[in-house]
Each structure stands twice: as C-alpha cells, then as structure tokens.
Image (cartoon, grey):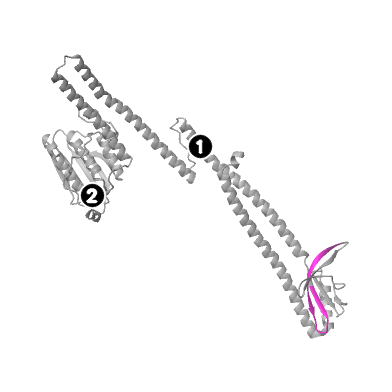
Amino acid sequence: MLRLLRTNALRLAAVYFALFAVSVLALLGFVYFSFAGFVERQTEAIIRAEIRGLADQYEQGGLGGLIDTIHARVSGQQVRATLYLVTDERLEPLAGNLTGWPRAESLRPGWIKFPVEARDGRTSETDTALASVFVLSGGYRLLVGRDLSDAEAFRARMNQTLVWAGWLTFALGITGAVVMTRNMLRRVDTLNRTSERIIRGELSQRVPLNGSGDEFDQLAANFNAMLDRIEQLLTGMRHVTDNIAHDLRTPLARMRARMEVALLERPTATRYVKTLRDTIHDADHLLATFNALLSIATVEAGARRDPLVAIDLAKIARSMAELYEPVAEEKGLTLTVSSDAAVSVRGNLHLLSQAIANLLDNAIKYTPSGGVTLSVRRDRAAARLEVADSGPGIPPDQREAVFNRFVRLEASRSMPGNGLGLSLVRAVAKLHSGDVWLEDNNPGLKAVLSLPASDERALAREAAMPERPVAKARRLSG
C-alpha cells in the first residue's frame, strides 16, 4: 500500500477524482438550490393567488362575504396547510384558523415568517409558516400563509440525499482510483520484471501483450520490437566478430609465416623484396576489409558527408558503366547499358556510385562468359536499377544471406573479395529509403536496386552532374 501511495498513477487518479468530486458536488448543489428555490417560489405563488382571490371577494361581497369565504375554506381543509386570518385595525381576530396575530419575523415588506403549532391527535409539534399580509380598505388586515413543514421535509430529504451521494461519490472515487492504479501498476511491474531479466542477460524475454490495443500494449509492442532489433544487432555483431576473427586470422598467419621463413632462410635481396611485396599485399587486403567495415558502419549510422540532393540515377549508371567497360572487355564480357532519358532520385552521389560499382564488380567477377546488362527505369514512384549477368547465379534460399557481412558462398571462396560488397549496397539502399534484392535472370542473377523517385523538376534545379566522375569509385568486392 505504501508503494501504491508513492506512484504517479495514484496521484493522477487522485487529481481526476478531485475534479470529478468537485463536479459532482457542484451539480448536486445546483440541483439542491434549484429545487429548494422552486418550492419556495411555488409557495409564494400560491399565497399571492390566495390573497388576490380573497381581496377580490372583499371588494365584491364586503367583510361579511370575505369572512364567509374564509370559514368555508377553513372548514373544507382536511389537513391544515393554508393559514388564514382577518383582523380589524386593532389586530383583533375576525375569522380564520389562527387564534391571534402571530409573533412573526419580518422577511421583507409584506412577508413574514412565524412558528405555528400543528396538532395530530394527542401529539403536537411546532412548524414554520410563511405568510403575506395585505391591508384591506377600511383598515382590515388579511393574512394568508402556508405551513412549510412539507418544504422543510423535502429540504431535509434533499440534504440527506446529497450527503449520501457525496459519501458514495467519495467511496466510488477512492475505489476506482485504487483499482485503476493497481491495474496500471501491474502492467508497469510486468515491464519492470521483463527489463530486470533482460539486464541479467535473458535477452529472449519479451513483454506479454493482453490484446487490448491500449497505450500499454503499444508500449509493450514497441519495447518488444526494440528488443528484437537489439538481439538481432547483437547476434549480427557476434557473427561479424567471429567472421572478422576467421577472415583476418588467415592473412595474419600467412604474413607471420612468410616473415618467419624469410628470417630462417639465407638472406637475399630478391627474397626480401618478394616477402615485403606479399606482406604489403596482405596488409592492403586487411586495410580494405577494415575500410569496408567502417564505410558500412558509417552508412548504417546515417552519417553522410554530403546532403541528399536531386541527381540523375541514369547518368550515374552510365558513368559507372564507362568505368567498368574496360574490365569487362579484359575478361571477354560485353557490358550493355540501357536507361530512360532521366531518372531523378534524391541521394548521395558518392554512396550511390559506390553501390552501383559494387553491383557491377560482382556481376563481372562471377560471370565466366556472356555479358552483363545495366538498366535504369522509372517504375511509377520508384527508380529501378538492375544489374543482370549470365553467370551461375545464387540459389534462392541463399540470396538473402549474401547481404550479411563476410558471407561468401562456397563457389566464390577461390575468388578475391571479403564478402562486404552487398552489405554496403543494402546499407546505401536503406539510407536512401530504398531496398535491394536478388532475382533469377534465366540464366544468371539479377540484382535490383529500388529507390524512391524524385520530381524531375527538382533535378533541373540542381547543378548538372559531371558526365564522368573525377575519381574512381572505391569498390568493395563481394
């Protein structure tokens, strides 16, 4: 209970309860004063109507007619509710059901309030009466009043009802606040317990959903999605670490063995030069791997050196094709380019050039004969770049895995590379709110890079991109 009292949920519930209680009390108070005032106004209206009628009777029938009318009304009452009294100018009673002029409290001109004794069999009780005094011509006084016992009983019942309503509101408010707080605290406790288990290393724990779709369910769903992403990243980091250790161990061991052999054999300048060249080659491979990892990490973190601007993807593709055409010719392959006149996207020129270079490099590297086709088309709201080859392709069940870091299929183990090229392409695609995937080319493989297309008018406003890049795009072989 002490923990419950310290929660923000209970404080919030208490604030809402206070607002609710004030609203209910204000409503009940309005109802009370409205009905109480209505009863008093109704009583005064009845008294005024009685006085007007009796005054008209006096004007028509004189004092005798008035006295006869009052006697008739008094004798016709089964329960004394209306009080009548006619006196002379010395306040001596002439007619009515009052024995004498009452000792009254003046409320306002013409209106008085006084105690009246009511008898019921053997019992008697004193009630309060409200009356109006009217002076008739000739100095006679007419008093007409009403017993307020019914009105006071109604007021007492209203007071009792309001008190019970107040207590009921208080009890229901406190109960509702406690129940709501305990329910909210139970959901928060579930989240806290799951967090504590995760802190202890149980990364597979997830917050259960109750299916209500409320804000706690949405929070739990987002929390679980965050945990899934964290677990995925940790698993990927573990795999990357294992792959780095595996891929770097071989060139490091080869470098050490080569230098150790050079020290054990008879020293010659030719052998030392060859050893140094081979060592530099392995060191370059290690540096290229680390540079590739840094580039992927930079792109995935969203840290880019240049802002996204409107550029022509078709022009970039043609520039990359010109860059790789000599490489394809050297291997005996044909490199064909087809594109629309202009396909505008918002992107980073350097990163998109690097992604296209990686796709072309992979296609040329793994195609033994035939050709490679590069095409760029606008497909509705997307710009679609395809690199198709006539090589052996990749089995469908392994196409998604090759986008992971350091993943190289068995058929490509003998080829130079570090398994990071397609990882960078996917990172660049995600940075540009796009995607990349692999398809069948029958025969061969087709890599598809899809990016959101931009307005062609935005491309015209940007500075024209050079037809050919100044420097070679850095390639990360897959």
Can residue 58 be seen here? Answer: yes
At horizontal 33% and vertical 29% (from top left) the residue drawn is 241
> Which secondary structure lies at badge 1?
helix
**Main secondary structure type of the part rendered in magenta:** strand
Say above or below: 138 vs 24: below
Residue 284: name its quadrant: top left
Q: CA distance from mark 1 to mark 2?
A: 49 Å
Magenta stretch contains residue 146: no
Would you say the residues marked 1 and 2 are in contact, meaning their CB atoms lie under 8 Å apart? no
Asked whether, in this view, residue 181 is left or right of residue 371, the answer is: right
**Left or right side of 186 for 172:** right
**Which of the two labelled residues, at mark 1 and mark 2, occupies the earlier sequence position?**
1
The magenta-colored residue range is 124-144
Question: In the figure, residue 469 lies in which quadrant?
Answer: top left
Magenta-span inclusion, residue 131:
yes
* Residue that label 2 marks: 311
Q: Mark 1 belongs to which amino acid?
A: Asn
Q: What secondary structure is marked by label 2?
A: strand
Dot 1 crowding, Cα within 10 Å, few <14, some 14–19, many 20+: few
Q: Is residue 220 above or below residue 102?
A: above
The image position of residue 431, as x and y in percent, is 30, 43
Q: Is residue 441 visible?
A: no
- Residue tagged 1: 192
The structure residue drawn at horizontal position 23% and vertical position 49%, both measured from the top left corner, is 311
Callout 2 crowding tier (Cα within 10 Å): few <14, some 14–19, many ≥20? many
x then y, percent, for residue 245: 30, 26
Q: Amino acid at mark 2?
A: Ile
Q: Which quadrant: the C terminus?
A: top left
Where does residue 286 sit, x and y in percent of width and height? 25, 29
Quarter where residue 268 is shown: top left
Rendered location of residue 206, percent (x, y): 45, 36
Numbered label attached to residue 145: none
